[in-house]
Amino acid sequence: MEIQQIKGFFKVIIFEGNNNYKVAKFKLDDGLEKSITVTGIITEIFEDLKYCLHGIYKEHSKYGMQFEIINYEPVSNDDEESLLRFFSSSLFPKVGKKAATLIVEQLGVKAFELLKEDSTIIEQIHGLSYAQIESIKAGIHSSDDLNDSILFLSQHGMTQRNIQKISATYQKDAIEIIKKNPYKLIIDIDGIGFKSADKLAYSLGFEQLHPYRLKAGVIHLMNEHSVSTGNTYITRQDLNSLFNRNFIFMEADEFNILLNELHQERLVIYDEDVIYLAVQFDAEQGIANYLCNFLLDSKKTKLSESIEDDILGIGLDMNITYEDKQVEAIKKVLMNHVSIITGGPGTGKTTIVKGALAMFEKLYPDFDITLCAPTGRAAKRLTQLTAHGATTIHSMLKWDLETNTFGINELEPLQTNVLIIDEFSMVDANLFYHTLKAAQFVDKIILIGDEHQLPSVGPGFVLKDIIQSQCFPLTRLEKIYRQEEGSDIVQLAHEIKLGNCFSLESASDVKFINANNYHVKSVVSQIVQNALDKDYSINDIQVLVPLYKGIAGIDEINRSLQELCNPPSVSKGEIKLGYRILRENDKILQLKNQPDDEVYNGDIGIIAEIINKEEDFENKDRVICNFDGTYVEYTADNFNVITHAYCISVHKSQGSEYPIVIMPLIKDYQFMLQRRLIYTGITRAKKSLILIGNSEVLLKGINEEDRYPRKTKLTKRILKNFV
């Protein structure tokens, strides 16, 4: 079997046997920072130090994929490695790792200084193309401040992606700012976390108890807490406890001094008995202010006496017979400046939106109407259902990936009369705040979502909080209108909302298959094969699982389904990335927003072509993916933003529908299973739903309402503004 090499940071020993045999956890240095279980003879090793491990991947029957090491050594960050990163950076667009290696091998560790003094010596390097030589010359002669910054950051272990962000934000002042306080990166640069800044600070000689580090540690812990819990704030006591566990022990009085300094710098905000990160406080307070000012500064639109007849007539034109509640919902949308529509699948949310759109066009033909949704797939689905163009919220606000800023904002506001946001349960507090800041000229805002779905990935629970305030017109849809194929799924969804699942026993569109943890992979594969035999495509079938690790986790199921649906072939190009293999025709998932490429977090596509570096003019591996006609190219710099999509998480499936959904519900997942997650997963199925696992686990999950309710103060802030 082929010996492989991986790099990662040692985290913890989880088992020790005889003769130095150990089982350990490492965090891979792969951009995603996924953890891997490593087994083998491990003697002296240090936490958070980077190691190069040599060995082979093996699948354990109980614990899933593991890496069995043959040997290992620490990775030194020497000048040679940093120069390789520098010469293959964005400053030299035609130069890849192979060309960079030639330069360093032939010019040595003084390559940069030599080329800066006389760039023509690059012509003496054997093996470089004319384009690569010219690229080196142009890069060396570009802004001295810029290439000095890139070399400096490369020498200190920064990735090319982060170097681009830092250069875009700080420009010529980058080195000066970073040398003064490397922890400033955490505040200013999206995507650079505490560990990256801490590594940089360590290499610059900052001590562990430096005040900048301690303050950055507080910000880091508050960020981690909000991401893991969804809470927008934390109590002082909980924050002190977290700090003592992760940094150094501080008595409450001493810790309060540290917090007071952060408060004076407006990095944290005191709010009664709790503490906010400034960005989260501003988002929550801003939403309340904008919504309330929006209502208070506006008057209700008066409707004509014939409005109900007009709505019914519009419905008949679209072959829709509107019932009284639906007519009232459309009237609320037309009359009010903020309105909310919530309901489960099959309750007619889209039918009401189509009616409202038609009425706006009839009554206000000059109105500009904007439809948007949090994800690309949700926006595409909204376009299909309404026959009205929709976009993602990030695209609508012209979000810039490098600087994490919005081009459409309070200074350059939205130029639209009506703003309709679908799948609003997925919208977090920060994104909605930026949307409202840009909506000062918007006349009407309509929020559409399912209040029983999972909340946003980011902090907050905006839809639930706004509904709970009872300050805005609400239409809650409960009657099921869908009667076609898939209606049993809709019925089951409505039962689950009430804590029941009676229709499982008689439903034709829903099947439950008993299986234990170890049989899930084979059962899933059998179901998928049966569907493929019935002429369904792999894009019609979606497996949803809440966990990545384990024998029945997302990673393992993806691996087995890749073998089934897209086995290796001499006619298919492929690239090996650790234990993952990307192969032509693979179904893949986009993990991050890339607005410049018109592809967004949650989009699903197919690998159309793989170009191996031996065939590439820049000596780079390339993967070209097709997202419904939009082609996007990836190189080693961003392979980590795509992964296999045969099996995905329930969170990633939000805003999408699939003809067939397969959803395992087993003991391995039970600590994550609760009503909202199960409800969200099953409502992704349009025609057929197959549940696999243990009925007791299913019932326990359905009866588990919000185990850890999100802590926010948005409802309280809205109510306070209305008093």
Image (cartoon, grey):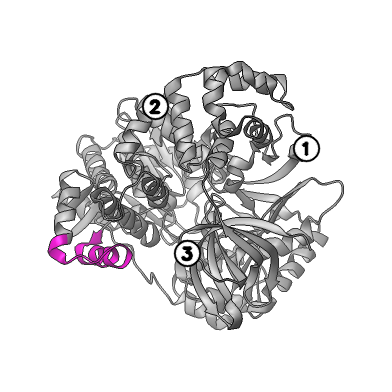
Among numbered discs 3 and 2, the one appearing first in the sequence: 3
Q: Is residue 631 above or below residue 711?
A: above
Q: Which residue is mark 1?
A: 614
Q: Residue at x 57, y 43 (%)?
A: 385
Label 3 and label 1: CA atoms lie apart by: 37 Å
Circle 2/circle 1 CB separation < 8 Å:
no
The kind of residue tagged 1 is: Glu
Label 2 and label 1: CA atoms lie apart by: 35 Å
The image quarter containing residue 708 is bottom left
Point out residue 666 in the picture as x, y percentages from the top left corner: 58, 76
**The label number, if any, that marks residue 46 in the structure image:** 3
The image quarter containing residue 456 is bottom left
Q: Closest to the observer: 52 or 516?
A: 52
The image quarter containing residue 486 is bottom right
Tag nearer the camera, 3 or 2: 3
Give the residues drawn in magenta, as a range: 234-254
Label 3 and label 2: CA atoms lie apart by: 36 Å
The dominant secondary structure in magenta is helix
Point out residue 303 in the picture as x, y percentages from the top left corner: 32, 36
Under circle 2, the secondary element is: helix
The kind of residue tagged 2 is: Gln
Q: Quadrant of the N terminus?
A: bottom right
Under circle 1, the secondary element is: helix
Q: Which residue is mark 2?
A: 171
Q: Residue at x 20, y 44 (%)?
A: 266
Circle 3/circle 1 CB separation < 8 Å:
no
